[in-house]
Amino acid sequence: MTGEQYLRDKLNQALQTGELAQPGDVNIILEKPKMEEHGDMATNVAMLLAPRLRRSPRDIATALLQSLDLDSEIVTKIEVAGAGFINFTFGQSYYQKALLTILQEGAAFGNSSWGQGKRIQIEFVSANPTGPLNVVSARAAALGDVMANLLRAAGCAVEKEYYVNDAGRQIRLLGMSVSARYMALLGKTEPFPEEGYHGDYINDIARQILEEHGDSFAGLGTKERWQALAEMAREALLASQKEVLSDYGLNFDTWFRESTLRDTDEHLKVLKNLQARGYVYEADGAQWFRSTEFGDEKDRVLVTSEGEPTYFLVDVAYHANKYERGFEQLYDLWGPDHHGYIQRVKAALLGLGYPKDTFDVKLIQQVNLIRGGESVKMSKRAGKIIEMKELLDEVGVDVARYFFVARRSQSPLDFDMDLAKKTSDENPVYYVQYAHARICNIIRHAEESGIAFPRNAPLELLTDDAEISLIKKLVDFPNTVSKAAQQMEPHRIPTYLQELAGSFHRFYHHCRVVSDDRSLSEARLVLCKSTQIVLANGLALLGLSAPERM
RNA sequence: GCGCCCGUAGCUCAACUGGACAGAGCAACGGACUUCUAAUCCGUAGGUCACAGGUUCGAAUCCUGUCGGGCGUACCA
């Protein structure tokens, strides 16, 4: 049991039995004070009760302490401070023993059961298979993967999904684009589509198809050629997307194809469902959804006047399909240019009767690549994009993932290529990894010096400030992980790891681990091992390697 | 015009969702390698939390307005 849980239980007990007994629930907030003088854990519960009890916060705090029954081994100091905070200080033995929990739980340390096995699906990247993945996809990929890891650690049953838009207009354009290039390679002219794809990769694909299949497509009718080439190009691009993501350490549980919805007319069933519920009307020859009834700005078209189902309708069917597969909570990660689209999807899902607040969209803000102090302009239309693969080749997987995850996802990100490429102290990734490698080295050195890892180390010897503050940081890990999961804020993990690594490096310089004092060496080895576990667990959540040597 | 996101140290970002004196890294300056890795550590300096009101015991955080930056506002996907 963590110290926080212990205090929470005791406070609840005091609030139910003592003179301050409360009829209603009191939401007790316990948190780690910023300043060390304020102890290890503080609560503002007295201030929250003050208006209800019509007594001063300090007065309530004092009374509360009377009915609070705490083990003096665990909590060594309690005080009422400031406007009415109650500050608790844990004893050194509490912290020393906490190390045993870390060793015991190992790779599971940091996990919690908060999610209670809730079935969650998180869908991200989902780029059209009409081109290579770009750096924005790389950011979404890192964030989605880490969010999934966090939710899993918090006890949810999470699946990662990639939605493949393998049907519709953009695929037709892809086929026409490739076809134009293919014919050009054969010396024949075919007009390039107005809104076609201009990137060099289109040419590469055309050339590859020519090499593998010769000129056999030239003899087909135009439409047949377009379709055949569209399919081949689509599958080739999809395969290369999968490859890049896999190199990135990201493997999706499901690749869901839009065509499976269209093939089974699932979008039409959804349309009927919405009609049956009275949310569809006809105007100007099109079928409209009354999304304004659910707070959207205007109603939205489901079927065009030409009789074509809109992307929106298929997308609604897709999300309905997710629910039908048994997921209780859906998350999508979208680019900032789609924010206007959120409301209408939510509206449609409510219209279909799915529970409120079970579908949420996290917007991932754009990525600004900085090279030589200047931002690199990207233009999709001109085919000038920075490919994810280029980025990974240049800076490596660990650095890329770390940089993307270290910032709040809703803030635009300046990605400094020059900084990312530096293998020096300016680069924060190595700071954390170095701490891990350093510990591995200490443990190796201890073994060489004849000190095996101790079964029962005298942990009470760990009393130095540097040692205790390192342990405090370690003990905070589970709390950090579950907060990050609950708020869907991956950036908390890099921030935490940065601080933990700092605590460790400070300890390293202040306290020699392997020394003539065998007992002390053993105790410090346990501290090192515990730190190693937490660093490794944290790096694993981020999908980064935990190097044993650097 | 309307809607969403953002504005914190010279730069890149935190601040546990309303808590106590706003913290890190980089850059600058000054120190520490005969030691378990100096990819490290110690110290100095750096702030009107964009601005103005409001809400309350208490605001970087909530509400209103203003100013800046980004994005969106299709019977496209």
Image (cartoon, rainbow, N blue to C red):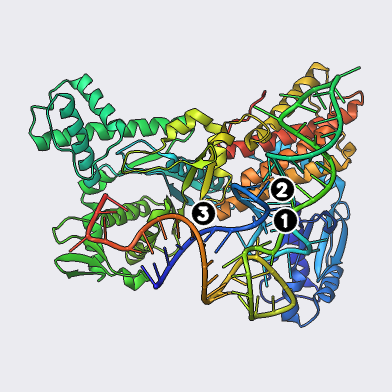
Tell me the crowding category of disc 1: few under 14, some 14 to 19, or many 20 or more residues within 10 angstroms, Cα based. Answer: few
Amino acid beneath label 2: Asp
Chain of residue at mark 3: A
Q: Residue pushed farthest right?
A: A517
SS type, badge 3: loop
- Quadrant into which the C terminus of chain A falls: top right
Distance Cα–Cα, label 3 vs label 2: 25 Å
Task: Point out the tag, 3 or 2, that comes first from the N-terminus.
Answer: 3
Q: Position of residue B8 (x, y in %)?
A: 65, 57
- Residue A410, label in figure: 3
- Is the residue under label 2 in contact with that under label 3 (CB below 8 Å)? no
SS type, badge 2: loop
Circles 3 and 2 on the same chain: yes
Q: Which residue is identified by label 1?
A: A5
Distance Cα–Cα, label 2 vs label 1: 12 Å
Q: Which residue is identified by label 2?
A: A476
SS type, badge 1: helix
Q: Tell me if residue A112 can be seen.
A: no
| Above/below status of A363 relative to B31 | below
Circles 2 and 1 on the same chain: yes
Circles 1 and 3 on the same chain: yes
In the visual, does A337 lie left or right of A52?
Answer: left
Q: Position of residue A320 (x, y in %)?
A: 33, 56
Chain of residue at mark 2: A
Amino acid beneath label 1: Gln
Tell me the crowding category of disc 2: few under 14, some 14 to 19, or many 20 or more residues within 10 angstroms, Cα based. Answer: some
Tell me the crowding category of disc 3: few under 14, some 14 to 19, or many 20 or more residues within 10 angstroms, Cα based. Answer: few
Q: Nearer the viewer, residue A477 or A175?
A: A175
